Amino acid sequence: MPEGDTVFRQCRILHEALAGAEITRSDLRVPSAATADLRGWTVSEVVPRGKHLLLRLLPPAGPGAPTSPGTSTHPGTSTRTAEPLTLHSHLMMDGIWHVDGVSLRSSDTSAGPRPRHTARVVLEAIRDDGREVRAVGYDVKQVRLVRTADEDELIGHLGPDLLDPDWSEQLRARALENLRARPERPVGLALLDQRNLAGIGNIYRCELCFLHRIHPSAPLREVADLPGMVDLAQRLLTVNTSRAVRMTTGGMMGRRGDLWVYGRAGEPCRRCGARIQRGELLEPEIEGSEGRVIFVCPRCQACATEQREKKGQGAATGPRRPSGRGFRA
């Protein structure tokens, strides 16, 4: 699944191509917005919110403006609603936008061609300089068209965005407050919960836990420096908004030395030499949910798990082989 920094870069590309352009053709291939006609609307901006993409639109100017999609007029009247709208989408596991046939290059998305039938949003627009632009969202999910004033109905549940351009001590304090509200929750689950803080995906979860020498299944209260973990998450995402290949190691590990543990099952730990192990961490609060993969160093991240095992509280996916779905090198 694309992480917050990938979504940020995707929005930047879309914004540079579409901001200020007037839409000449739109095709929203989802039931809730299939009849919407955005011709004449102008793209004001494309911004990220956590892992959500918000393409904001301004209504056509002057008389005869078309009715805003999703609104209706009262019988016997000619009043047309023309409020700013937001086209919302989410990349989920494999979504991506192409601009003029070119896709975003990133280490967590496929930059190759996509089948035409996977297109969910097609927008064609013309810019002030006369250039025609075509943007296509392939495999994007949660496509919804709402009044911009109602955006909070879609994203209001999100915690502070680690890539908010106005990131501040207040937002940092809110993120910490959200995390500390449930000290017993596994740190790996708390970091992925976008209600706590927005932008962290599975790659950053694994890397952050390794860098702070804690197992993802350990309770949040065992994180020795939670403020430091939030600060590190914010710095890593920020620095990677300008990179096609995500890096958490600082670039000093040579070829293929971009990550510490993620995707490196069976390879030696870059810190201690132990073999990196792969496992799953289940989300018990979501019925029927499947485990998300995690990668850990059994030596560097063993402390918290070993303490629980000694107390007879073995983690379901600790570094020692558990019953059922377990770790494999």
Image: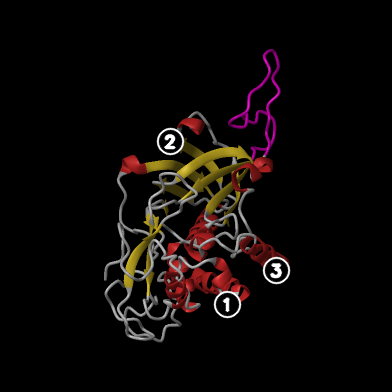
As helix, strand or loop, the secondary structure at mark 1 comes to loop
Residue type for callout 2? Arg
Residue situated in front as seen by the camera: 228 or 156: 228
In the picture, the disc for residue 168 is 3
- Quarter of image, res 267: bottom left
Q: How many numbered discs sit on the rendered protein?
A: 3
Q: Which residue is mark 2?
A: 29
Percent from the top left, x then y, of residue 193? 54, 56
Percent from the top left, x then y, of residue 231? 60, 74
- Quarter of image, res 71: top right
As helix, strand or loop, the secondary structure at mark 3 comes to loop
Residue type for callout 3? Ser
Percent from the top left, x then y, of residue 132? 47, 49
In the picture, the disc for residue 91 is none
Q: Earlier in the sequence, mark 2 or mark 1?
A: 2
What segment carries the magenta color? 58-83
Q: Which residue is mark 1?
A: 224
Residue type for callout 1? Ala
Main secondary structure type of the part rendered in magenta: loop
Q: Residues within 10 Å of mark 1 (few under 14, many from 20)?
A: few
